[in-house]
Amino acid sequence: MIVTRRTLFAGIGGLVIAGCDRIDASPNVRKLLSLGEDATFSAQRLVTDRAALAPEFAAAQMSPTFRTNGNTMPGSADYASHVAGNFADWRLAVDGLVARPLSLSLAQLRAAPHRTQITRHDCVEGWSAIGQWTGTPLRLLLQQAGLSTNARFIVFHCADDSGGAPYYESIDLIDAFHPQTILAWGMNGTPLAVPHGAPVRLRVERQLGYKQAKYVMRIEAVASLSGLFGGKGGYWEDVAGYQWYAGI
């Protein structure tokens, strides 16, 4: 049996999260875990080709069923209105540390240069599926907005409101400018469905599934993650202690 980082994470990650809640609650332990995570992140960056592509597959290899996970219908009245109107009035904001903030319609995103890729989604719960994604490369939007040299992270604010807490995710500029990092508005040859994150979700193909934020409403360029919500860079990172960098 070949053991990969993904199988290790799936096999022992759940035990660590489920079995260490009490000790993990200690501020000192949280600090030590954070230091270990930073070391792992730095080590992976040193030994990994930053421009390497995630594996892509043939259409015949696509999974017959692609599971949904997480929230499958945000509960806000605004999102329900967008669904009822087929997202005709939906706008994607691109702001923060940029020279030219953007407000883009779904039609504008679909009309922009786009990329189609068939990749494998690896979920932290232990399952995988292969699907086809079509969307606008994130780097094109950041270039159009005029990303500031002070920006270090890209934050995705979502319509999802799991447990009443704002749902968000973030990545660094290396992943933001990766050619396979796209804002997907199509899945398996059809418009992205609501349970899978319509109208737009992030696909950052070299990270685990929980980094693939659904229901993206706003993209914000920031210099630091420390002032955002729980300060860990993402919803699951804040509430469950998931690693911020989930590279595979």
Image (cartoon, rainbow, N blue to C red):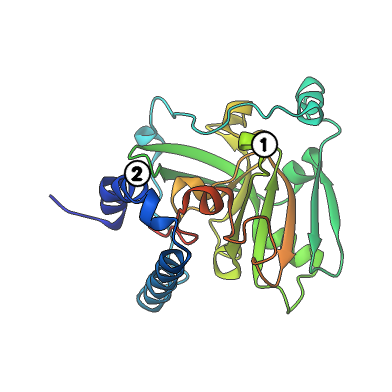
Seen in the picture, residue 115 relative to 143 is either above or below; the reply is: above
State the separation of the CA atoms marked 1 and 2: 22 Å
State how many labels appear. Answer: 2
Left or right for 64, reference 211? left
What residue is pinned by disc 1? 164
Left or right for 179, reference 66? right
What residue is pinned by disc 2? 18
Left or right for 200, reference 211? right
User: Where does the C terminus fall, quadrant-wise?
Assistant: bottom left
Mark 2 Cα shell of 10 Å, populated few (<14), some (14-19), many (≥20): few
Mark 1 Cα shell of 10 Å, populated few (<14), some (14-19), many (≥20): few
**Residue farthest along the left direction in this orientation:** 1
- Of residues 46 and 26, the one nearer the viewer is 26
First reached walking from the N terminus: tag 1 or tag 2: 2
Q: Could you tell me which secondary element the residue under label 1 belongs to?
A: helix
Is disc 1 in contact with disc 2, using a CB cutoff of under 8 Å? no
Residue 59 image position (x, y, % from top left)? 41, 36
Q: Amino acid at mark 1?
A: Gly
- Of residues 53 and 173, the one nearer the viewer is 173
Residue 196, numbered circle: none
Seen in the picture, residue 37 relative to 190 is either above or below; the reply is: below
Residue 156 image position (x, y, % from top left)? 67, 52
**Residue farthest along the top direction in this orientation:** 84
- Of residues 191 and 205, the one nearer the viewer is 205
Residue 145 image position (x, y, % from top left)? 80, 64
Q: Amino acid at mark 2?
A: Ala
Residue at 54% in and 47% down: 212
Residue 157 image position (x, y, % from top left)? 70, 49
